[in-house]
Image (cartoon, rainbow, N blue to C red):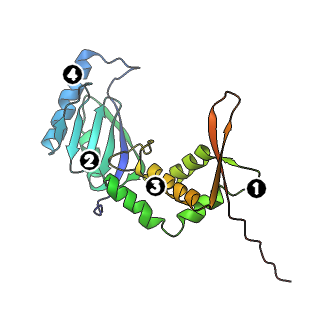
């Protein structure tokens, strides 16, 4: 599993004369010459990108350098250093630091194991609750519920700072549990066509709600 290094999705906001997609060539060259030098002198590696904006690399930190921001996975311990470097800029102005989601340094296999370990005792009941309906003739749209659950349980990773995609480990995990509940008869699935003729899947829990006991 991942080590104890704290990593976040960070955006270091700067102003370098970028105006609605336009930047004077002289200012462009001055900015990139200066900022590349600042980060290289501080020990960062530089990876050039085919679209023009380089990446600055140090440990697990990987910053995409744009004239409006430096953004990407950033080790917590590197934040003060980066802010100090940006504060020294002469061809640009450092404005602020925005910290977003914590990022986990998981491989796909480690991420899947995280879900299986963390939610081993609760995930089945969560899915059954999500598909439970008061009327056995009432079903819920399968994809809508599954997408909501993926968004609820998904962690952001260094590998995928922006989160989910259709083949993410979290998506695979939720659908794996769903398929097992369906196989065991704890969920019931049906198919219906919408007005456009598209076949959609609907589902409901096949486990009745436990009646609540009251004391007199």
The answer to whether one can see residue 87 in this image is no
Question: What kind of element bears circle 3?
Answer: helix
Query: Residue 38: x percent and y percent?
Result: 18, 38
Q: Number of callouts in the render?
A: 4
Picture disc at residue 29 = 4
Q: Is residue 59 left or right of residue 206?
A: left
- Residue occupied by mark 1: 136
Q: Earlier in the sequence, mark 1 or mark 2?
A: 2
User: Is any atom of residue 215 visible in this view?
Assistant: yes
Would you place residue 55 above or below residue 7 in this image?
A: above
Q: Gap in Å between the C-alphas at discs 3 and 1?
A: 27 Å
Task: Say which quadrant the N terminus sits in.
Answer: bottom left
Separation of disc 2 and disc 3 at Cα? 28 Å
Q: How many residues crowd around disc 2 within 10 Å: few (fewer than 14), some, or many (20 or more)?
A: many
Q: Nearer the viewer, mark 3 or mark 1?
A: 1
The one of 84 and 5 positioned closer to us in this rendering: 5
Quick check: 195 above or below 10?
A: above
Residue 61 is marked as 2
Residues under numbered marks 1 and 4 in contact, where contact means CB atoms less than 8 Å apart? no
């Amino acid at each position: 599993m991942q080590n104890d290094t704290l990593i976040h999705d960070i955006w270091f906001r700067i102003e370098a004369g970028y105006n609605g997609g336009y930047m004077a060539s002289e200012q462009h060259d001055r900015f990139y010459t200066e900022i590349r030098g600042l980060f290289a002198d501080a020990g960062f590696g530089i990876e050039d990108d085919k679209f023009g904006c380089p990446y600055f690399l140090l440990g697990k930190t990987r910053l995409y350098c744009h004239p409006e921001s430096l953004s990407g996975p950033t080790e917590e311990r590197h934040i003060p250093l980066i802010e100090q470097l940006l504060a020294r800029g002469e061809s640009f102005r450092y404005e602020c630091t925005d910290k977003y989601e914590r990022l986990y340094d998981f491989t796909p296999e480690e991420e899947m194991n995280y879900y299986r370990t963390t939610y081993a005792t609760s995930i089945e009941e969560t899915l059954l609750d999500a598909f439970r309906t008061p009327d056995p003739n009432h079903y819920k749209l399968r994809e809508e519920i599954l997408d909501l659950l993926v968004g609820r349980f998904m962690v952001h990773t260094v590998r995928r700072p922006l989160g989910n995609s259709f083949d993410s480990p979290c998506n695979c995990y939720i659908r794996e549990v769903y398929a097992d509940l369906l196989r065991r008869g704890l969920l019931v699935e049906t198919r219906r066509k919408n007005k456009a003729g598209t076949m959609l899947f609907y589902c409901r829990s096949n486990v009745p709600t436990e009646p609540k006991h009251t004391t007199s």
